[in-house]
Image (cartoon, rainbow, N blue to C red):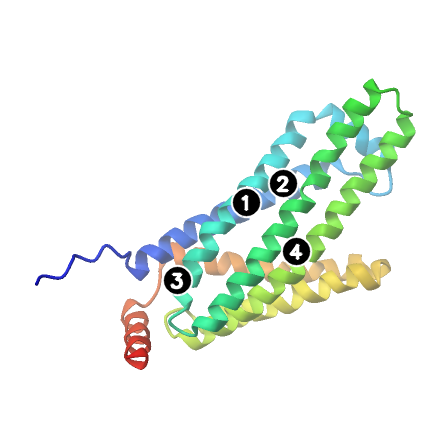
Amino acid sequence: MREAPQTEFSPQVYARLAGFFYLIVIVAGAIAEIFVRQQLVVANDAPATANNILAHELRFRLGFAADLIAGLSVMPLIVLLYELLKVVNRRLALLALSFSVVGIAVQSAALLGHFAPLILLKRGHDLGVDQELLQAQTYMALQLQGIGYAVALAFFGGTMLTRGYLIVRSGFLPPTIGVLLTLAGICYIVNSFVDFIAPAIASYTFALLIVPGIAETSLCLWLLVRGVNVARWEALRSNGEATLR
């Protein structure tokens, strides 16, 4: 009896697709944070922030859309990376996937804090709510979104630590990238807990997020340009299948 033809993607296809979705996540996230929120939100100035949002409403809405696109792209990304890394250690790959699922769920919920200012400033005015109160609520909504992102980053830190270890052990991706991801995980977690416990020094630890930027961009570009060592990946998969027999 003839075997049915295999339709499974090759690891190289998984790698290229993962790199593509990773690039969307990085670019869309940068647009939302750097080119929208950092440009429109004025530190400790609720009226100026509110005026900027109303004056650049479309830009602010596009920032929300960019963040949502990034969140949607994370879902196929983490499944593809799970498929690539499960040949190293299935349980740890599942743990990395689980950290990411929780992280993106928290981040998506926190994204409501980005949209809230539009409802407060536009709908609140129609309802006759005091303008200064609306401006204060707008600023606090954005601050709550920042806290929500910090919570999400703590879970993404768990993802980076686990994924970094798997890459170091894999042999089909550069161990240097695995080390960078491990450091990125530590930076994410430290930055988040400083935000929660010692916000007065948070501006100093914010620079730690440069490390995750380098690490994740490196992994993204490597997956897009070089992919994986297919022979090593196939060997690990074959060993795993032999162990299960």
Separation of residues labelled 2 and 4 (CA atoms):
16 Å
Q: Which residue is mark 1?
A: 70
Assess whether mark 1 and mark 2 are in contact (beta carbons under 8 angstroms): yes
Mark 3 vs mark 4: which is more N-terminal?
3
For this rendering, which residue is in front, 98 or 125? 98
The residue tagged with tag 2: helix, strand or loop?
helix
The residue tagged with tag 4: helix, strand or loop?
helix
| Tag 4: amino acid | Ala
Residue extending furthest front?
1
Separation of residues labelled 2 and 1 (CA atoms):
9 Å
Residue at 79% in and 26% down: 121
> Can you say whether 65 is above or below 195 in the image?
above
Using residue 91 as the reference point, say whether residue 132 is left or right of it. right
Separation of residues labelled 3 and 4 (CA atoms):
23 Å
Q: Which residue is mark 3?
A: 83
Q: Which residue is mark 2?
A: 32
